[in-house]
Amino acid sequence: MVSMTSWLEHYGYALIFTALFLEMLALPIPGEMMMSYTGLLVFEGKLNWLLSIVAASLGVSAGVTLSYWIGYRFGNTLVTKYGERIHLGEERLAKMTSWFEKYGNKLLFVVYFIPGVRHITGYFCGITRMPFRKYAVYALPGAVFWVSLFISLGRVLGPKWEMYHKTVNRYMVIFGILSAVLGALIYIYRKNKQRLLESILSLIKKGIRHFNSLGKVRFLVLVAFVVFVTCVSLMLGLIQDFLAQEFSQFDEIASYIILTLFGPEWRQPMEFFAVLGSDVLYASVILVTALWVLFKSRKKLLELSFFLWVLVGGELLDEGLRALFHRPGPVVFGHQWINTFPSEDTITAVTIYGFSAFLLLRHAGKSAVAIPVTLIVILACALIGTSRVYFGTQFPSDVVAGYVFGGVWISLNVLLLEILRMLQKNKKTGRKTE
C-alpha cells in the first residue's frame, strides 16, 4: 500500500490514466486496487475526486478502444492461424459472433465488474466485427460508471478501505454478474414478450382459458411472478447466511458507508424519513386504498378481504419470523434492541406500500402513473430502512431481510389474488354456459 500511494502522490492523474489504459489491454495491473487507493487519496485531500474520475475514465476508454481496433485489425488473422490450438476455429468463432451480435452489447456496460472478462472483451468485440458505434455506446458509459463507483467507494471508506477491499470486490463481482444476467433477461423478455407472458400466465392460471381477459394486468402479474422468484432465492440465501453468522462484515461496511454519506447534519431529514414508517401514515395509506377499491373495483369484497388478509397476515408473519430467528439487535445508549431480524419497519413498509400500490395501479385509468408510483414506493421503503440504520436501531442486514421477506409476501399474495379472481370468473362463465 505504501509504494502504491507514494507512486500515486508522485505521478497523480498521469499514473491513473496509464495504469488503467494498460489494464484494459490485458496487462496484469490491479485496476480496482489502483482506483480504490485513488479514492483513499481523495479522502485525504491529496487528489481531486472529479479529476481522478476523469483521468481514470479516459484511461479505461482509451484502453478498450485500442483493444477493440487491435481485435478488429488482427483478430481474424490470428484465429485463422492459431485458433485451432485453443479450440477456437472459424466455425466456433462464427457461432460466438452470432451470439454476441444478439446479446453481447447488452453486457458491455457491466462486464467491467467481472475480473478477467473485462480484459478481453474489447479484443473479442473487434474480432466479431461488432460495429464500433454500438460498442462505444455501451462500453464507454460502462467505463465511466465502473471507475466512478470504485473511486467513490475508496473516498467514502477512507482509511477503512484496506480492511474492506476484498469484501467490496466480492460484492462488485456479484453485482456485475447479476447485472449481466438481468440485462440478458430483459433482452430476452423484450424479444419474446408475448410468448413469455402467455407461458407464465398459463402456468399461474393452471389451464384457465381466459388469458386475454386480463388486459393490462398481465404485466403486473408477470412482475409479481419475477419478484416472487427473485425474493425467494434471496430469502434462502439470507437464511443460510444468518445460520452461518456471516452478516457481521456486511453490517459493518454498510453502516460505515451510510454514516459517512449522511453525517450529523442529516439528523433532521432522517427523522422525517423515519415518519414515513409511522402508524399514522400507514393508516392513511390503508384508508385511501380501501376507498379506492370501493370506488373502482368490481370485486370489492374479494379485494378488501385480501387486503385485510395481507395486512394482518403480514404482521403475523413479521412477529413469527422475528420470534423464530430471535436475533439481538444493536445497542444504542446502553439499550439493546431485540428480535430485529427481519426488520419490522421495512417488512411493514413493503407490505403496506407495495400491496396498496398494486391495487392502485390495477385500477388506474392511465398506465403512465405506473412508473411514478413504483418509484415513490421504492424510495419510501429505502428511506425508511436508511433511517433505521442511521439511528442505529437496526442492522443493515435486518433492513435488507425485511425487504426480501416483504417482497415474498406481497408478490405471493398478488399472484393468489389474481388466481382467485380468475377462478371466480371461470366459475361464473361455466354456469352461464350450462
Image (cartoon, rainbow, N blue to C red):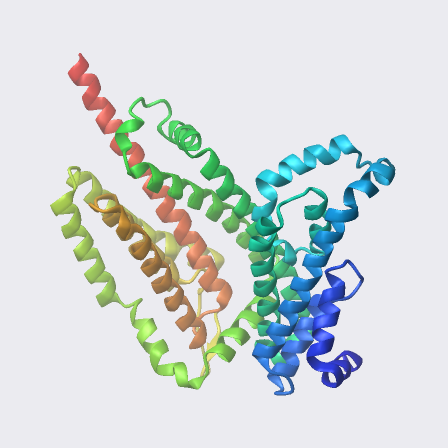
User: In the rendered image, which quarter is residue 86 located in?
Assistant: top right
109 with respect to 73 (left or right): left
Residue 116 is at least partly visible in this image:
no
> Which residue is nearer to you in this view: 5 or 432?
5
When the figure is inspected, residue 419 is found, relative to residue 295, above or below; the finding is above
User: Can you name the residue that lies furthest to the bottom here?
Assistant: 45
Q: Residue furthest left?
A: 295
Q: Quadrant of the N terminus?
A: bottom right
Residue 193 in the figure: left or right of residue 372: right
**Image height check: is 421 above or below 351?**
above
Q: Residue at x 67, y 43 (%)?
A: 129
Q: Which residue lies furthest to the top in this view?
A: 434
In-front residue for pair 271/31:
31
- Determine if residue 108 is in view: yes
Residue at position x 21%, y 44% from top?
A: 363
Query: Where residue 404 sits in the image (x, y, percent)?
Result: 45, 54
Say if 345 sits above or below 36 in the image: above
Q: Where is residue 378 in the image (x, y as percent from the top left)?
A: 37, 59
- In this picture, residue 431 sits left or right of residue 356: left
Residue 152 lies, in percent from the top left, at 57, 73
Name the residue: 58% across, 41% down. 103
Q: Is residue 174 above or below residue 13?
A: above
Q: How many marks?
A: 0
Locate the C terminus and report the quarter of the image it occupies: top left
Give the percent coordinates (x, y) of residue 299: 17, 37
Q: Residue at x 39, y 27 (%)?
A: 202
